[in-house]
């Protein structure tokens, strides 16, 4: 039975900071960010946008197409959770008016958990082939101001449905996966900024990739030549390039661009989307590939610090382009509003009140939903 991604939708903040603006403010050569890190802009969520509103804004586009009919389970992957108890997906369930007969749960393992959700979703669909699972990955990448990680911030959400006989990408059963208890990147509950040992995190990302790929290759009998394209977890686009160069040693710049270039277009603009990043890459590839990828195999690498890495693959379905939301994604990115450096810092410092009082948040540009305020320690969401 073919099981995989039936429909996929991407959303990011309506605001961005140009990395050249950041470089100027921090006294850094802009080429370090644009060429060395490989990022052009980063999505910055305003005070009334969070992982819930981004997730709902991604998923509502699927709902409007009837793609959520028959969804029995909502798996929400994030490492920017908004509550220690209530799953962020519960708010989305309410905002989208999903049926009462629905399982809702939140998953965490840094940037890896959306892939865990995909695997669990495939298991559920294998047991009940007529059922459908909605997976949403939504995150805000936030580091300390002035730290090396600052240029690798970003935000975004991807919503996708897993079903039998999918329209977009069937997922192969083979996978290589690897876990190691390391402290390369983490965020204690009492901090709103991630802590990271940057260089070490890059080494571990590659170590996990090599182990996962070796296992995948042994299990599947496939080699790199069996793939038309590759999508990686994208903390910043140069990381994906470095990763592929490790697997395909000596690859020319031209061939590297051919096999990963289209998958990096959206991330270069939105920045790191943590759990969503690999899936932003898949969306970017399918939306932007000039070549018809029908029937072609795509290599996929998911990485979550701490750490778990998984190499897996999928085959693009014939006619997949009819199921994509390419125009919506490209319009969203082209209509974003640029922030000045001062506006960026002001938004960064806008803290969520913790006093239990009643607070109404200023209205910025968002998708169809906004995080309107707080009351008695409850988050209030509304439709715009
Ligand atoms: N022109 C062109 N390139 C330049 C340049 C210039 N003027 N100045 C520097 N560069 C290049 C450097 O040579 C370097 O490239 P190479 O690695 O190919 O040599 C690149 O720009 C970056 O420069 P530095 O190594 O000096 O950068 P840094 O140490 O200040 O910060 C970072 C880089 C460590 C990635 C930092 O941004 C960071 O900590 N980011 C967060 C952690 C992260 O994203 N880790 C990735 C793996 S972990 C993961 O994937 C999980 C996750 O999502 C977080």
Image (cartoon, helix red, strand yellow):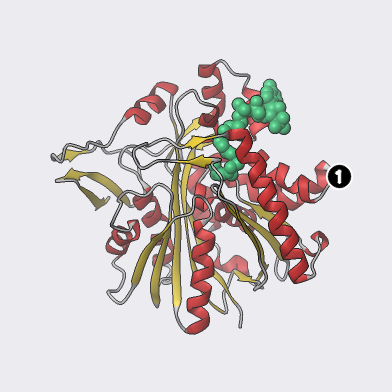
Compared to 375, does 61 lie above or below? below
Indicate left or right for 44 with 101 as reference. Answer: right
Q: Give the residue displayed 57% in from the left and 24% down from the top.
A: 20
Q: Which residue is mark 1?
A: 250
Indicate left or right for 269 with 132 as reference. Answer: right
Pointer 1: residues within 10 angstroms few (<14), some, or many (20+)?
few
Question: In this view, which residue lies farthest toward the top?
Answer: 27
Front-lying residue, 296 or 52: 52
Quarter of the image with the N terminus in it: bottom right
Residue 271 point in image, percent of width and height: 53, 40
Q: Give the residue displayed 72% in from the left and 58% down from the top.
A: 213
Front-lying residue, 12 or 380: 380
Disc 1 within 8 angstroms of ligand 1 (CB): no
Residue 88 point in image, percent of width and height: 33, 56
Front-lying residue, 375 or 319: 375
Front-lying residue, 27 or 220: 220
Q: Is residue 129 visible?
A: no
**Ligand 1 rendered quadrant:** top right
């Amino acid at each position: 039975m073919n099981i995989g991604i039936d429909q996929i939708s991407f959303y990011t903040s309506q605001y961005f900071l140009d990395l050249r603006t950041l470089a100027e403010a921090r006294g850094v050569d802009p080429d370090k960010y644009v060429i060395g890190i490989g990022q052009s802009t980063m999505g910055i969520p305003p005070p009334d946008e969070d992982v819930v509103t981004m997730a709902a804004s991604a998923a509502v586009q699927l709902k409007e197409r009837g793609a959520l009919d028959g969804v029995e389970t909502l798996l929400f992957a994030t490492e920017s959770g908004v509550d220690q108890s209530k799953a962020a997906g519960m708010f989305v369930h309410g905002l989208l008016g999903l049926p009462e007969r629905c399982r809702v749960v939140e998953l965490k393992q840094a940037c890896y958990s959306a892939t865990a959700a995909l695997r669990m979703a495939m298991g559920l669909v294998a047991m009940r082939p007529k059922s459908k699972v909605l997976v949403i990955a939504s995150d805000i990448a936030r580091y300390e101001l002035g730290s090396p990680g600052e240029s690798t911030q970003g935000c975004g959400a991807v919503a996708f449905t897993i079903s039998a006989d999918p329209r977009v990408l069937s997922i192969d059963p083979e996978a290589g996966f690897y876990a190691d208890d390391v402290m390369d990147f983490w965020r204690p509950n009492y901090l709103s900024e991630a802590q990271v040992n940057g260089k070490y995190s890059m080494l571990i990302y590659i170590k996990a990739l090599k182990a996962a790929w070796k296992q995948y290759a042994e299990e599947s009998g496939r080699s790199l030549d069996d793939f038309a394209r590759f999508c990686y977890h994208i903390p910043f686009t140069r990381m994906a390039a470095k990763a592929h160069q490790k697997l395909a040693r000596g690859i020319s710049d031209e061939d590297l661009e051919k096999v990963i270039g289209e998958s990096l277009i959206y991330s270069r603009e939105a920045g790191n989307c943590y759990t969503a990043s690999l899936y932003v890459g898949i969306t970017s590839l399918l939306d932007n590939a000039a070549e018809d990828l029908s029937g072609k195999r795509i290599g996929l690498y998911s990485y979550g610090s701490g750490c778990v890495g998984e190499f897996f693959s999928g085959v693009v379905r014939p006619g997949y382009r009819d199921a994509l939301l390419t125009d919506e994604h490209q319009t969203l990115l082209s209509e974003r509003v640029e922030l000045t450096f001062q506006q960026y810092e002001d938004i960064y410092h806008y803290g969520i009140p913790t006093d239990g009082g009643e607070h109404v948040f200023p209205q910025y540009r968002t998708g169809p939903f906004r995080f309107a305020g707080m009351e008695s320690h409850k988050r209030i969401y509304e439709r715009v």
